[in-house]
Amino acid sequence: MSELADTRTGKVGGATELDALVIGAGFAGLYQLLCLRDRLGLSVKALEAGSGVGGTWYWNRYPGARCDSESHVYWYTFSPELMREWEWSERYPGQAEILRYLNFVADRFDLKRDIQFNSRVTSAHYDAAANRWRVSTEQGETFIVKFLVTAVGCLSTANVPKIPGLQDFKGDWYHTGHWPHEGVDFTDKRVGMIGTGSTGIQAAPVIAAQAKHLTVFQRTANYSVPARNVPLTADFKQYVKQNAEEIRTATHQTYNGMFFKVDDRKAVETSLEERETIYEAAWQRGGLQFRAVFQDMLVSKQANDTAADFIKRKIRSIVKDPKTAAILSDIDHPYAAKRPPIDTDYFETYNRPNVSLVDVKTSPIQRISESGICTTEAEYPVDIIVFATGFDAMTGPLLRMDIRGRDGVALKDVWEAGPRNYLGLQVAGFPNLFTVTGPGSPSVLCNMPVAIEQHADWITDCIAHMRAKGLARIEARPEAVEKWVAEVNEVANRTLLPQAKHSWYLGANIPGKPRVFMPYAGGMIRYREICQEVAARSYEGFALS
Ligand code: NAP
């Protein structure tokens, strides 16, 4: 800290000087703050736009919001005591319970005293001469820091489509990612919900149970597998407590940070009868494990077709109205090439007399009137519109801040044609800036807490290494970035993932966004090894000075 500093506040000329700043206080931000403060002893703060901790789980309070990772893997594993102290109540944790958990963790480790809430970062500019980041908030504060870590989430910039007329709508409208804390009362209301991704699929049954009428506007039909959520038994809770360490180890050894492993057998080498039995068992068991029953499901179109066909038949057998069933099962992409939703009574919901489906692929939404949603074919009067229309994923939360590296170069210019970085962790020309679960890392293809802990640990070890060696600056080398971007593309192209043309993995849901497959699809286990090897080779691919 400079001599002009007010030692009581850490402020210099109105700016707060710190060793490090973390942006965000969700799963990633909380843990990164803890690592930097309590393990390294840095002066560090987290800035959080919301008024509380929780990130995704703070904002996404829509009806039915629930995690699709099972609760025994959806938590922090850095502290054995913490794993013993917390107990989940259901197979998949719901939003409110996850938010309670994150508050519990924040209080348990006394993190809130170093989190500044209601503070949205608007810009972060690197000053090469001082080797410091100058970070400004919407609230007019400035921070000058050596290390800047973004923990802004992958799905935190809401996408409200620009549909003409929305401003004239006389009813209420909400985006699921900015749900009012007090909730929304749908009683006696006609509700129009746009979007049938994981969010819409979770929300529809819950809204339909309360509303007078729910009209779902579907553009791209989607697969979904039953979640089969249940309260956890006392035995299972006991099992988790006794085996927490083993569960943790197992999640470090899988492709996707889950506890279950992808089976070795191939769909294309399995007889039709046996395949049917396997799929039926997986359907009954429920959840994302459906994806894991054949190892070739995500790499062979022929194999994938067998899973796709099974689910489409299921949809047609559940949904009684043949026309609705046909629209719901007219799916244009391989199963799990888009993020596969899991649900509770989603397809069953269309059998309710108060639910209808509108196919906006054949008759697109044209505008919103004062009283409803207008497609090319009809006007649907509604009192409430729910936008379950997703997010400007992965790059959106970073690019909405004005981040500038060396020589004032803007991140949005460097990423004009898509994200370019090394290991998803650092961008060339942006020294000492780390991006937790950034594009180019497994992030959304992995159980998030596993990906987050690995990133936060790696960043913490890296900064510890720099301090031990008396180094002040770390920066990804351009050639390492080139290689990594090529690697991210190559591993994605070995899978069917890029074949879902409307996927947010590709940025295709946002008009004008470059279509680049963003997450690293080579698997969390491989990614972890690569990061370890890089560190062991004195941070190969990074320039340290
Ligand atoms: P999403 O997967 O991007 O789905 C958005 C939906 O809105 C799609 O059906 C999309 O149609 C539709 N849409 C967007 N703009 C539209 C427009 N102008 N007109 C008509 N339809 C439009 O978003 P999401 O459902 O919020 O999910 C995002 C991700 O969040 C998930 O994939 C998952 O990773 C995560 N999530 C997880 C959980 C969980 O853990 N259970 C729950 C919710 C979300 P198109 O497909 O045609 O673009």
Image: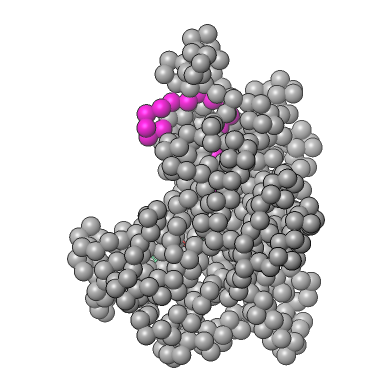
Residue 127, position as x, y percentages in the image: 50, 23
Query: Residue at the spot x=47%, y=43% of the render?
Result: 52
Task: Looking at this view, name the residue that lies furthest to the top.
Answer: 3
Q: Quadrant of residue 141?
A: top left
Residue 502, position as x, y percentages in the image: 48, 66
Q: Which is more toward the observer, 396 or 481?
A: 396
Query: Residue at the spot x=47%, y=34% of the render?
Result: 116
Q: Is residue 400 left or right of residue 10?
A: left
Classify 94 as above or below 4: below
Q: Which is more toward the observer, 174 or 369?
A: 174
Q: Quadrant of the C terminus?
A: top right
Q: Is residue 287 left or right of residue 345?
A: right
Classify 19 as above or below 102: above
Query: Residue at the spot x=67%, y=76% of the render?
Result: 285
Q: Quadrant of the N terminus?
A: top right
Classify 276 as above or below 502: below
Classify 12 as above or below 267: above
Residue 393, position as x, y percentages in the image: 49, 54
Task: Looking at this view, name the residue that lies furthest to the front.
Answer: 234
Q: Magenta residues?
A: 137-153
Residue 204: say if magenta. no
Q: Quadrant of residue 361?
A: bottom left
Residue 361 visible: no
Q: Is residue 511 left or right of residue 87?
A: left
Residue 138: say if magenta. yes
Q: Which is more toward the observer, 186 or 314?
A: 186
Count of numbered badges drawn on the protein: 0
Residue 251 visible: yes
Residue 374, position as x, y percentages in the image: 25, 72
Query: Residue at the spot x=77%, y=48% of the render?
Result: 529
